[in-house]
Image: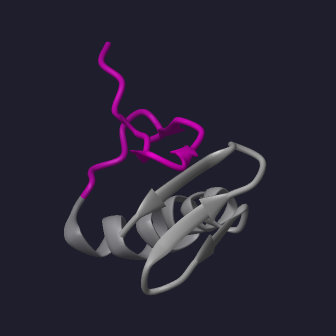
Amino acid sequence: MSVMGSVAVSQVGMTEVILVNHGVKVIGQYYCDVLLSQQMLPAIKRVAERCLFTEEYVACGEIGHFGVL
C-alpha cells in the first residue's frame, strides 16, 4: 500500500501533513476543489496568521523569526 500526502514548509513554519484518502484518484478538479481549497490553503493561512507581512520584512512573533523580503 502507498500513501500520498502534502505538507507546506517555509521559514515561518510548517503545516500539518495532509493525507489523501486511500483509493482516491487525484485529478485536477479534485486537487483544486478538495486538497488545495479545503485542506492546504486553510492550513497555510493558519501558519501565516502568526506573521506580519509588509513590503520590506516579515515578522513572526511566536516563532521569533524576522526576515527581509
Residue located at (64% from left, 56% from top): 47
Q: The C terminus appears in which quarter of the rendering?
A: bottom left
**Residue sitting at the far top:** 1
In the figure, 47 relative to 55: above or below? Answer: above
Q: Is residue 61 left or right of residue 43?
A: right
Magenta-highlighted residues: 1-26
**Residue sitting at the far left:** 28
Please tell me which residue lies in front, 19 or 16: 16
How many numbered circles does the render carry? Answer: 0
The quadrant where residue 50 appears: bottom right
Residue located at (46% from left, 57% from top): 67
Q: The N terminus appears in which quarter of the rendering?
A: top left
Q: Magenta part mainly helix, strand or loop? A: loop
Image spot of residue 55 (x, y percent): 43, 86
Based on the picture, tell me whether residue 58 belongs to the magenta stretch.
no
In the figure, 44 relative to 25: above or below? Answer: below
**Residue sitting at the far bottom:** 55
Residue located at (48% from left, 71% from top): 57
